[in-house]
Image (tube, helix red, strand yellow):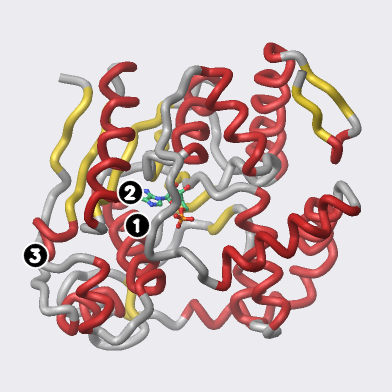
Amino acid sequence: MIDLRRHNSNFCPDHFVKFCRDQVARAIDEFEMIQPGQRALVAVSGGKDSLAVWDLLLESGYEADGLYVGLGIADYSDTSGEFAQRFARDRGLRLQVLDVPESYGYDIPSGARAARRVPCSACGLTKRHLFDQAAIDGGYDVLVTGHNLDDEAAVLFGNVLRWQTEYLARQHPVLPEGDGFPKKVKPLVRLSERETAAYCVLRGIDYMVEECPMAVGNRHLGYKEALNEIELASPGTKAAFYFGFLQRGAELLRVDGDRAAELGVCERCGSPAGAAICAFCRLVERAGGHTMDSRPVETGRQ
Ligand code: AMP
Ligand code: FES
Ligand code: ZN
């Protein structure tokens, strides 16, 4: 039996899997994430959420390929890459593998130090850029990530604590395509971390359990822990906080979010940029790497 206090319910394994599919279907429908027949690119880290969302999309009949980005975080990247590749290989799926040290000449730990950024910020910037580029180059209709309810509630919490209104205005489970950006969707927003982990166990999905060593002790994890304490005392609060924001708070902040419209094009890579050279190309330069027009290596389906 799987006990979900926030829903006041207990599920047997089969019904729990159905519950997860229904939550994903509801999110896709409610936020108009993916239309039948569209092609999705799923960013897979080898962790539970992204493998679960890939599996859930395929099970629901969507056409979905994977993208794994090797960030050069020593053993962590090697192992997470193996989980992603094994998942794809065992199921005959198409997975693009893009290795940052190989293609761009830097890794996250030393690149972040050289660029004087905290690792998670250099990592986030790198991933966002490479996800966008791969989705655009591959002609995909949507880019899918495995962000779940806990992730989104923790980001919201952090943004509210500092009243970062620009970030708040953009926080939505769907970001529309436009100006060189692909449409980006988060179909797991209705599922918690605990639920995606249980889904993987029930579906026999082997995933990387360890968290990224660079993220240990960061603010985001602290916010997650704080919200978990609150959720424990008052089940359902996390979902009420996040969905209440989407339904009633986000609208009030819309004006700030429209500033994103004034973007130009990066001289080096052609991506959308707020300056002559985009933030990613500046990071690559400061990290001592090189920009190059790298195409992902394809593995999986032969
Ligand atoms: P994180 O930024 O680690 O919280 O991950 C958020 C989402 O980004 C995951 O659910 C994945 O969809 C995606 N992701 C994270 N790391 C990678 C990676 N190395 N390669 C591809 N996708 C990733
Ligand atoms: Fe990006 Fe850890 S996965 S810093
Ligand atoms: Zn650029």
Vertical placement of residue 250 versus 172, above or below: below
Vertical placement of residue 205 versus 110, above or below: above
Vertical placement of residue 116 versus 56, above or below: below
Q: Residues within 10 Å of mark 1 (few under 14, many from 20)?
A: many
Among the two numbered marks 2 and 3 on one chain, the one whose residue lies closer to the N terminus: 2
Query: Quick one: SS at disc 1?
Result: helix
Quadrant hosting residue 207: top left
Give the Cα separation between the discs numbered 3 and 1.
16 Å
Q: Which residue is mark 3?
A: 292
Among the two numbered marks 3 and 1 on one chain, the one whose residue lies closer to the N terminus: 1
Q: Which residue is mark 2?
A: 135
Quadrant hosting residue 71: bottom left
Query: Quick one: SS at disc 3?
Result: loop
Kind of residue at disc 3: Met
Query: Residue at image x 79%, y 58%?
Result: 229
Q: Which residue is mark 1?
A: 132
Marks 1 and 2 close (CB-CB < 8 Å): yes
The label shown at residue 259 is none
Kind of residue at disc 2: Ala
Is residue 1 left or right of 100 when viewed as pictured?
A: right
Disc 2 within 8 angstroms of ligand 1 (CB)? no
- The x and y percentages for residue 239 are 79, 51
Query: Residue at image x 18%, y 31%?
Result: 299
- The x and y percentages for residue 294 are 11, 55
Residue nearest the viewer, comparing 139 with 52:
52
Residue nearest the viewer, comparing 169 with 110:
110
Q: Is residue 228 visible?
A: yes
Is residue 54 left or right of 90 when viewed as pictured?
A: right
Q: Residues within 10 Å of mark 3 (few under 14, many from 20)?
A: few
- The x and y percentages for residue 272 are 33, 72
Query: Residue at image x 69%, y 11%?
Result: 14
